Structure formats: C-alpha cells, structure tokens
Amino acid sequence: MKIAILGTGTVGRHLARGWLRAGHDVVLGSRRPREARSRTGDLPLTDLAAAVADAPVVVNATPGTASVELLASVGADALAGKVLLDVAVGFTADGSLSHPGESLGEEIQRTFPATRVVKTLCTVDRKLMIAPDSVQGPSTLFLSGEDAEAKRTVSGLLRDLGWPADCLLDLGGIATARGQEHYSLLFIGIAQALGSYGFGIRVVEETARPA
Amino acid sequence: MKIAILGTGTVGRHLARGWLRAGHDVVLGSRRPREARSRTGDLPLTDLAAAVADAPVVVNATPGTASVELLASVGADALAGKVLLDVAVGFTADGSLSHPGESLGEEIQRTFPATRVVKTLCTVDRKLMIAPDSVQGPSTLFLSGEDAEAKRTVSGLLRDLGWPADCLLDLGGIATARGQEHYSLLFIGIAQALGSYGFGIRVVEETARPA
C-alpha cells in the first residue's frame, strides 16, 4: 500500500522504516524537501502535494501546533476520501496541550470532513511504535475515528508494524482522541519517573467472574 | 492510624471499608452528616471539622469541583501539617476537566501550603481501589506530591488496601498530578470501549538490554 508520511522528524522517519520493512510503498512529504534531505537519508522524499497525490493513506507526523495549517496547504480536495492516520499531539511553548478539553484529531476531522481521520500511536514513543515487542509484555494501542473501514485499514497497518490484533483497542468516534491526547501529560510524567520513554501501558481487565 | 475521609459518596465509602478491613480507625466526614447517614450505614460518620480534628491523614473524596471550598470550610489551620490524600478529579457540567492544563491537586496544595498533599488513586475505579487483585494481573498506581514522608505514609496506606509496593510509581512533585487527572479522559474512553470501569493500566517497561 502507498503510504504518504507528512513530517520528516524522528516520528515520521521511524514510521517510514517500519512500514518499508513490512513491504509498503512509503514516501515522506516535506514542505522543504531539499532542506529535509540531510536528515531523511535514503528514505523516499518529496514535497507534501506529490507525496499525497496517489497515496490512499496519509500519516500526519507533523508538529501538532502546525498540522492543520500544513494539511490546509495540501488542500481539502487532495485529502478527500483518504485515510488520515494522525499521530500528532500539539504542545504550546509552556508544555501545555494545544487543544485542552478537545483534541487535534477532532480539529483535523472537522476541518477536513471528507477525509477519514483515525487517531492512534500517539500514546507511545517512536521506538515502541515500530517495535512493540521491545517492552516486557504486550501493551495497548488505542484507535479513535468515525469511519469503521478506515479503522480496519489502520489496524492492518499497525499489525504490519508488529502490533498484535488483541493489543488494539477501538475507543469509538474521533471525540475519543481527547483521551489519547490528554494522556500525553501522564506519559511525560511516567517517562520522567522511569528516566526512559521506552514503555507502554497495558489495559488490564477485570478477572472473569465465575459463570 | 486515624483516617478522616471527607465525602460520603461511593468512593469515600469504598475507601472507608477498605481501610477498616485493614484495621485502621476510619471516620467519614460530611457537611450534612444527618442527611448522609442514609447512605453510610454503619460506617463511623461525623461532620467535617470533627472528622479532621485528630486524624493525621485526611482523604479528599469530595466532588472535585467543590473540594477547595469544602476544605476551606474546614480551615487551613485545621489541615496544617496533615497528610491530605487527594483522590478527586473535577469535571464541569459538559464533561470537561475543571482544571485543564493544571490540576485540582496543585490548586489544593497552593491553597493549603502547610498541608502535605499526595495525589493518588484517581486513575482507577472505586472497586479496583480496594481490590487491586480484581483484575487479570498487577496494574500501576501513581503518586504525586512534594513531601517524601507524606508519600511514604500514603504508600503504606495503599499497601494496606492490597496494592503491592512494586505497583506504586512515584511521579514526583504535585505538578505531576496533571498527568493523573488528565488521564481521566482516556480512562472514560477505555471504560466506554470495554463496557466496564473494572480495569487498570499497567506500565510495561522496556526489556532490559543485555549487559
């Protein structure tokens, strides 16, 4: 599957290598591909519009505070009908969420109503994203989005990164992206306590009651 | 140890039974103990001031949007020097956090500087609070607070509820209460997806690298 990854930061590059390894046709998209070349190495790289053009799946790995503007520069028409896998979380300069009480995922879905937004992967570090077995046991990944088919497509792409199907938890519509994005503050707290971003969280369900 | 639990809702009553079971001297405190009697059954119950009077540990299990006002009615002097175990999270009428970008725990600590606030237990349902083995494996509980001795006291009280020491993660100062409180939105999303509040989350750390 052709996957356009917008953003050439460490998250975008990690995801590119993860999906290339799984055999997908991946291209990175940058506002300034010439300047980005120094950090993208041998990864396929072009401008935003060219990356998106014939890719059914677009990944938003741009900084969360710039994402809507960058996607708008690509254009709602160019993004219409596509699956948009949104991994970004926006932080203001003082470390607060850029969308308190709401979410970037919802803003993107509202701004591009013809695009099928699925929020996921934003609760783990870039390394765990593509190496889910790097931690001491399975951890849980969450999905939020309005379109069931888009969530199936994204679930398949997550399995291609190594995430077992029973580690994926569909939270419901795009409004549930709030939970994923607000978790960032606990994520940072746990990372500082452990001295490492290399951790996941596992949802541990109730013990089944005797029948 | 004498523990005063402010709030006679289901959280306060569950915690009261948990610590009574462990042999502690527990009293519930209510603004209107006569009216509260119908729901507190045989649990020791008095007014807020009397409950706090000779208890070294005070538990805030009042509604998060009313907590600061209720604690102020008890008085900063009456709360000075005490350990205040804060489990509350405030939600506005539309379901948003009452302290976006901040936390109730911080507001309480700022308002009562002579009181030693420890935020914990707010990431799990009342049932799991006092029955940590009701889920399929250990889950993690978080602590936030400025005072190391207060956190040790609270850790002991959590162990008395059945939480193993290696399930407790000290996140640092009271500002890290933001993470615990902001997680509420993900907690609600997970609960709706599972159809149950009976779950915890476990922090799954990185596999140790070979030496």
Image: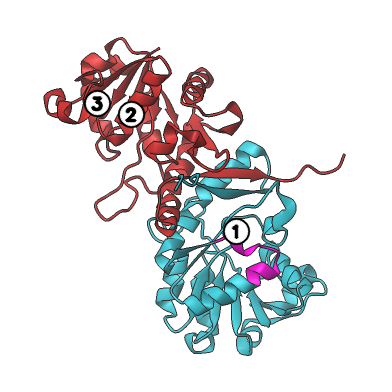
Chain colours: A cyan, B red
Q: Quadrant of residue A167?
A: bottom right
Residue that lies at the very extreme toward the right in this rendered image = B211
The N terminus of chain A lies in which quarter of the figure? bottom right
| Residue topped by disc 3 | B72
**Span colored in magenta:** A157-168
Q: Can residue A94 be seen in this view?
A: no
| Residue topped by disc 2 | B60
The foreground one among A166 and A156 is A166
Q: Quadrant of residue A125?
A: bottom right
The relative height of residue B200 versus residue B192 in the rendered view (above or below) is above
Packing grade of label 1 (10 A; few <14, some 14-19, many >=20) is: some
Chain of the residue displaying label 3: B
| Residue topped by disc 1 | A167
Of the numbered discs in the image, which one, if any, rests on residue B195? none
Residue depth check, mark 1 versus mark 3: number of the one nearer the observer:
1
Chain of the residue displaying label 2: B
Mark 2: amino acid: Asn
Relative to B140, is B205 on the left or the right? Answer: right
